[in-house]
Image: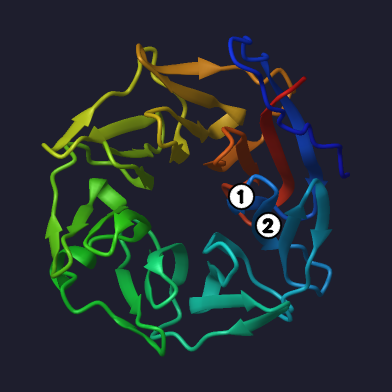
Amino acid sequence: MLCGLCAACGQGPGEELPEPTWDIVVQDEPGALLSVWGASASDVWVVGADSRDGKGPLVFHIQDGDVERLETGETSGDLWWAFGFAGGPVFMGGTGGTILRYEDGGFTRMTTPGTGTVFGIWGSAPDDLWAVGGSSDSGGGFAWRYDGSEWTDEPTLPADEAATGALWKVDGTGASDAWLVGSNGLSYHWDGTALVAGDTGVGSSLFTVSGNADRYVAVGGLVSGIIVENAGDGWTDVTPDPLPSSLTGVSLDDAGGGFAVGFFGSVYERLDSGWEPVDPGLGVDENLHAVWVDPDGGVWAAGGKTVSQPLTDGVLIRRSVSE
C-alpha cells in the first residue's frame, strides 16, 4: 500500500515552526524494509528483504513524493543497507557478499572478496568506500575497502578480534575519520591510516553508528536497548531510563539532534535533555530497523518483521513538517 507523503514547507522570519507530523509512506510490503538513505529529501532510497515473488530484494526509489519499485536483476536475497552520493552512484549491500551499484538507471553487481552478508556501507567518495558485515555474535566479521576499481580486505582489521563477531555498520565524517561497530560492543576507529580499537564499555551488539562534526552515536542491545556517544574523548553510555527495547537504527543531523529506532516501533529523539521516547501515533508495532534524517529535517524510518526468516511486512514511516 502506497500512502501520500507530507511535503515539508518553508517559513517566514519570526514564524513559529509547524508541528511535525508522522505518516505511513509504505506498508504491508512482502519483504521487510531494512535501510533508508537519500541524496536529499526528494531523492530517497529504501532497500529490504527478498519479496519472494521472483523479483528479488525490495528496492524503492522515492522522487518528489512518487514511490517506485526498481528491479535489481537479482532473483533472490536480502539487501541490508543503502548508501550513496548526490548524483550517484548508490551502493546496496546484502546477503551472499552482494554489493549492487546503481548508476545511470541500471544496477551492476560488483565483485567482492567474500560471501558474508554485507550489513553496512559508507564512504567519503565513490572511490573511497567501506563495506562491513559477518554472520553473528560468535561468527567472523569483515571489513572491505573500495578504491574505485575493486573491493579488497582491509589489512588493518585485527584478525583475532574480528573473529569474535560481526561488524554491523560503519559511518564517518571524512576519509580519515570513521567508526565501525559490531558484535559484543566492538568498535574500531579509522584515522586515515589504520583501524584502532575503541572501548564502548558494553558487551552487547552495537548495530548502527552515526556521526556528525560533534560526536558519534551507536545503538544496539539484544534484550534492552543501548545508546553510547563519543564526542572525541571516548564512549559514554547515555541510555535513557526506563530502558528502551533493542535499538537497531540511529541517524544524527548536523544541528546536534538525531533519532534512534528499534523493536516494536520504538522511536527516540535526541534533545538537550537526552534521548526521549517519541510516539508517532501511527499504530505501527513492527520493528523499525533503520532511520535517516534528511537535510530538511524530515525523519524516515524503515522496518518490518526483522527477527527471523522470512523477513516480511515492510513498512516505511516519515516525520515531516506540515503546513
Q: CA distance from mark 2 to mark 1?
A: 31 Å
Upstream in sequence: badge 2 or badge 1: 1
Q: Residue at x 40, y 78 (%)?
A: 127
Q: Residue at x 74, y 72 (%)?
A: 56
Mark 1 residue type: Ser
Side of 75 where 234 appears, left or right: left
> Under tag 2, what secondary structure?
loop
Neighbour tally class for label 2: few under 14, some 14-19, many 20 plus, Cα within 10 Å = some
Q: Is residue 95 visible?
A: yes
Q: Residue at x 81, y 44 (%)?
A: 28
Give the position of the C terminus as an image quadrant: top right
Tell me: residue 266, above or below residue 232: above
Give the position of the N terminus as an image quadrant: top right
Image location of residue 9, percent across then percent down:
72, 28
> Under tag 1, what secondary structure?
strand
User: Which circle, 2 or 1, is nearer the viewer?
Assistant: 1
Image location of residue 246, percent across then percent down:
45, 33
Location of mark 1 (residue) = 40
| Name of the residue lying farthest toward the front | 13
Query: What is the quadrant of residue 286 in the picture?
Result: top right
Side of 120 where 17 appears, left or right: right
In this view, the residue in front, 250 or 135, is 250
Side of 302 where 97 appears, left or right: left
Q: Is residue 132 visible?
A: no
Side of 285 where 7 appears, left or right: right
Tell me: residue 9, above or below residue 25: above
State the mark number for residue 301. none
Mark 2 residue type: Pro
In this view, the residue in front, 85 or 240, is 85
In this view, the residue in front, 115 or 295, is 295
Location of mark 2 (residue) = 310
Q: Residue at x 62, y 39 (%)?
A: 300
